[in-house]
Image: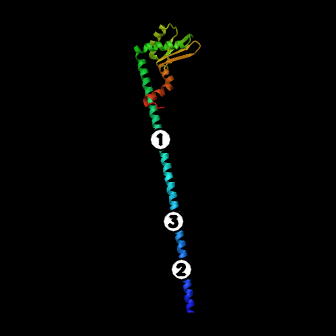
Amino acid sequence: MADLSALLEKEASTEIEAIRSEARDRASEIVAGARAEAESIEAARARASKAQGEAMLVRAKSAAQLEAASLRLKAQYEGVESVFAAAKAKLDTLSADEGAYAPVFAKLLAEALAGAGGQAVKSVVVAARDRGLAEKAVAEAGLKAPVETAEDVKGGVRLRTVDNSIIENTLHGRLDALRGELASEVSAALFGAKAG
């Protein structure tokens, strides 16, 4: 019986060893599978993190480009505005110099009269400081219309016809009328052909 017991014990040991070996193999497979899954998850997270980082970089780059474009447009706008402000200041300087302004005023009056198309002029409206100049120019033009003053007429003339039509011909009005057309040219002159 001792042999049988030893044989059973040996078989049991062999079977236990086989089970242990199979368990070790299975444990190794499970650990290897878990490692592979962990590496896969880590790689997926790294890819997602990299993609997120790249997306953030693209967004930051786009925001920076928009900010740069905004600053460029603001600089162009301010540059164009300063040119128009300087032009208005020059027009004000011209209209303050009676000697230089008298022929310009006479021409503005003549153009306004031509714009009236032969209609009788009821009144000539000018800036208060231009009243004397206007009275002289009106007399030289052979008009019998009275000269009136208004604060909103600056550097030129406004005619009222007998049918209440108004023809305005002022230096500032002309500049304002051409502003849209001139703004792109001024911007191109200041900032190059790509401006605007």
Q: Is residue 57 visible?
A: yes
- Secondary structure at badge 3 equals helix
Q: Which mark is residue 35?
A: 3
Across and down, in percent, residue 136 comes to: 45, 9
Q: Is residue 184 above or below residue 104?
A: below
Q: Nearer the viewer, residue 87 or 25?
A: 25
Label 3 or label 2, whichever comes before in sequence order: 2
Q: Quadrant of residue 192?
A: top left
Across and down, in percent, residue 24 comes to: 52, 74
> Within 10 angstroms of label 3, few (less than 14), some, or many (20 or more) residues?
few
Label 1 or label 3, whichever comes before in sequence order: 3
Question: Which residue: 47% across, 44% down?
Answer: 61
Gap between marks 1 and 3 measured at Cα: 44 Å
Question: Which residue: 42% across, 22% down?
Answer: 90
- Choose mark 3 or mark 2, whichever is in front: 2
Q: Which residue is mark 2?
A: 17
Across and down, in percent, residue 22 comes to: 55, 75
Label 3–label 2 contact, CB within 8 A: no
> Within 10 angstroms of label 2, few (less than 14), some, or many (20 or more) residues?
few
Gap between marks 2 and 1 measured at Cα: 70 Å
Name which residue type carries label 1: Gln
Name which residue type carries label 3: Arg
- Secondary structure at badge 2 equals helix
Q: Is residue 123 visible?
A: no
Q: Which residue is mark 1?
A: 65
Name which residue type carries label 2: Glu
Q: Quadrant of residue 189?
A: top left
Label 2 or label 1, whichever comes before in sequence order: 2
Gap between marks 3 and 2 measured at Cα: 26 Å
